[in-house]
Amino acid sequence: MLMVPFCREFPELAAKDRFRVVLRKANSPNPSVYEIVDLYCPENRCNCHKVSAVAFDCLGKACATIAWGWKSPGYYRNKWELDEKTAKKLSQGFLDPYGRQSADSTEIFAAFTHAVKSVPRVKKFFQKCYATLKILPLTNRQSYNHGFIEIE
């Protein structure tokens, strides 16, 4: 399935609305900051309710690719006919085996999944971006704004 970056479809909004993960490592005085680029299915008829989140370091290197769906495993089993294990994995999120990963992928993934499960604004951030791609006509795209989120 083709996934498009939110920032490509809504550059003005993406410039204002960003999501990043900050990792503070015990052996380093400086935190590692990863900008998250969120990718979604652009098909209006598709109801996948998921995001591919790619974490980029300050040099622009992709360090983690995460797939996450915010619906229940039952939704993915019934709607997409996924087996129980795959549906559960998508609902919980996973490091995409087809995406780029790095030595920090596991830590980035842990911070990401903690955020989407425990910080309601984070889950809503991705849901709103998904909804914007699905329902807003081109002429209304500049009117959408939900702010900056930083997770440490």
Image (spheres, helix red, strand yellow):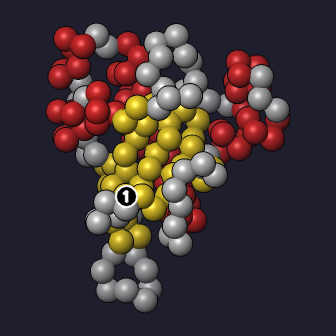
Q: Which residue is nearer to you in this view: 144 or 104?
A: 104
User: Where does the C terminus fall, quadrant-wise?
Assistant: bottom left
Residue drawn at x 37%, y 50% is 36
Q: Residue at x 67, y 31 (%)?
A: 72
Residue lying at 25% horizontally and 29% vertically, measured from the top left: 10
**Disc 1 packing (10 Å; few <14; some 14–19; many ≥20):** some
Which residue bears the numbered disc 1?
A: 56
Residue 133 image point, x, y percent: 37, 21
At which x and y percent is residue 112?
49, 54
Looking at the image, can residue 26 be seen?
A: yes
Q: Is residue 54 left or right of residue 88?
A: left
Is 141 displayed left or right of 63 in the figure?
Answer: left
Q: Can the viewer see residue 127?
A: no
- Residue type, mark 1 in image: Phe
Residue 8 in which image quadrant? top left
Q: Position of residue 150 (x, y in %)?
A: 32, 55
Would you say 13 lies left or right of 60 here?
A: left
Q: How many marks?
A: 1
Which corner quadrant holds the N terminus?
A: top right
